[in-house]
Every structure is written in structure tokens, then in C-alpha cells.
Image (tube, grey):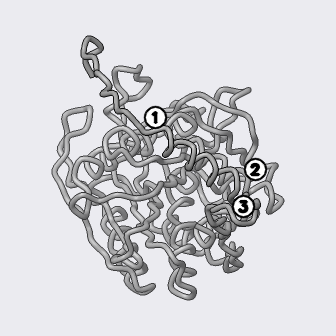
Amino acid sequence: MDNKLKYKMKKYSIPVSVCILSLLLTACGPEKTPDETQKQPVQPVVTKPHVTAPEFDADSAYDFIKVQADMGPRTPGSKAHDAAVAYYEKELKRYGAEVKTQSANVQSFDGKLWFLKNVIGSFNPKAENRILLCSHYDSRPFADRDKDPANRSKPVPGVNDGASGVGVLLEVARNLAAKKPDVGVDIVFFDLEDYGKPHGGMEDQDTWCLGSQYWSKNPHTPFYSAKFGVLLDMVGASNAIFPREGLSTFYAGDVVNKIWGTAQKLGYGQYFINDECQEMTDDHAPINKLAQIPCVDIIHYNEQQGDFFEHHHQVSDDITTIDKKTLKAVGQTLLEVIYNE
């Protein structure tokens, strides 16, 4: 409004007798008691009752992991890679998911072309309120962090780093089929997460996570959105610790609090620690930045040592690295969050 604009009040002449009558009526009238004053109705606070989540079966999750381990390294272009895709499609369909396999030609940092395949399973696809769960399934083609230089050109089995997250999510899918939650759930298995430039700097971050980068720009459903996402990476090793990862707390701090708080209530505080760690280059980065879905990374990382689990990108990342207690901690926490959303 223009401050220079002024309003002029009109003056009216009111008879004195009218004023006296008005005062008498006001003085003689009964005062309203507090009960007679109009009040706004108090809205009751509605809280959703706690839902008992299904029991996460760590033995079943372990079996899902072992099937992948027995295939061999799931490196891009390998027979094991193709077998893994077929296995994921079959299992997700078996549990009632609407399954799509997203394909695209992508180029890795070394100039090679690959036929990328992301596998997506949607449960209760018509529900508007959705949760995104994801993990990568590919194996790194070269064990460049192996202690033995002779092994550094060999492929990584990728059992904890890849297969463990998939195994947990397949067990989650089995539970979703048995007991349907109120929300819709999309499970995405990303390809080509682990084919990034070795020892790269910040400028090489985009050479990693090619599958999630593609999905974030081209979601499996037009205008796809989810309330939040959860990424699992290296979630099966003995004595694993999952700190509050930096990018997760920046983009999805409330979801981090929900997951870590739930884990601690369930007695898994030794895994889900309250320490914070640096930002990770992982599949949640493009989901947060490109798809703009708040996504949390549950990842094994020791901030004090400045490193991932001890067999990271080594030929020793095999089935012997998997601990069912860790699988139970991650899987049960995830089910508790899903069924009480």
C-alpha cells in the first residue's frame, strides 16, 4: 500500500438522546459468563497406533546373499551380471511386485560402453504415499585396494559391498508380500555404482553411481516422488557400524533421526551409532540432488579410521564377511520404519 495515500474520515452528527439510550441498555444488560463466550472447538490429537512389524528373518536374507555370491562377481557385461538381473526380476515378481527393468547405454570413466540395467519392484503401486528402498548390485571390476598387488586387476566378489544390501531388501520384499503396509514401497537395485575412477578426487565423483544417476534423471514412473528413500551399502559385515552420514543429515536429517532412533529403541545402538561422518559418494547423492528425494545412506564406515569395512574393494569381500546379526539389525530396523510410516 502506498504510504503517501491518506484516508479522510467523515463526521456524522448523532443525537444525544440516542447516545444516552445506548448507554442505559449496555449498563442494564446481563454480563456474559465465561461459559457463554464462543470458544473454538479443541481438535483431538490423533496418533497412529504402533504397528508390530513382521519378524525379519536373517537366515532368509543370508540365503539371498549366498545365491548372488555363488554367481561370481557381478561385473558389467559378465554372465553373473545377467544372471543376477534375471534372479532379481524373478524374486520380486514372486513376491507380488510390479517389476520393471530400466536399460540404457552408458560410458564408464575408461571410455567403455555398457548396457546398464536397473531393476525396480513396486509394491502397492497406486499408493501416493511411497518409500524408496535401494541398493547397488554390481561388483567392482578391479580389486584396486587389495593388499596383494597381484590381485588388484581381479574382480571383487562384491558380497558385502553390493549383495548384502540386495539380500536385505529381498527379505523385506518377502515380508511386504506376507503383510501389506499402509504405504507404497519401491525397491530399486542399481547397476554400475562401483565402476568409478580409482583414487579419484572431487572432480571424479560423477564417474561413480552411474545407475542411480540415470534413474534420478529418468525415473521408472513419470513425475515419480517418494516421501523419503533409504540406501543400503555394505550392511552385512561383522561388528558393522553405521554413522550418521553427512549428506544424509544435510538433506534428510529428520529421516536419519527416525531410523537411528528406531534402531536404538530396538536394541541395535551398537550398529547405528550417533557419530557423524563425512559425506559419501554413493547412490543417495543423485537421489537427493537430482531426483530431489530426501534419501539416507546406511553405510558401514569408521570415521576414526577413515575407512570402510576391512575387505572393501578386495578379493576377500566374499561370503565369509557376512554376519547374520548385522543383517538382522538392519532389516528389522527397516521393517519397523516401513510399517509405522
Q: Earlier in the sequence, mark 3 or mark 1?
A: 3
Which mark, residue 281? 1
The amino acid beneath tag 1 is Thr
Q: Quadrant of the C terminus?
A: bottom right
Marks 3 and 1 sit apart, C-alpha to C-alpha, by 73 Å
- In this view, the residue in front, 109 or 49, is 49
- Disc 3 versus disc 2: nearer the observer: 3
Name the residue rendered at 65%, 53% in the picture.
Answer: 258
- Crowding near the residue tagged with mark 3, few <14, some 14–19, many ≥20 C-alpha atoms within 10 Å: few
Single out the residue that lies furthest toward the top.
4
The amino acid beneath tag 3 is Pro
Q: How many labels sit on residues? A: 3
Res. 213 image quadrant: top left
Q: Is residue 225 left or right of residue 233?
A: left
Q: Earlier in the sequence, mark 3 or mark 2?
A: 3
Which mark, residue 30? 3
Marks 2 and 1 sit apart, C-alpha to C-alpha, by 21 Å
Q: Earlier in the sequence, mark 2 or mark 1?
A: 2
Residue at disc 1, secondary structure: loop
- In this view, the residue in front, 144 or 136, is 136
Whole-percent x, y for residue 98 in the image: 32, 79
Disc 2 designates what residue? 271
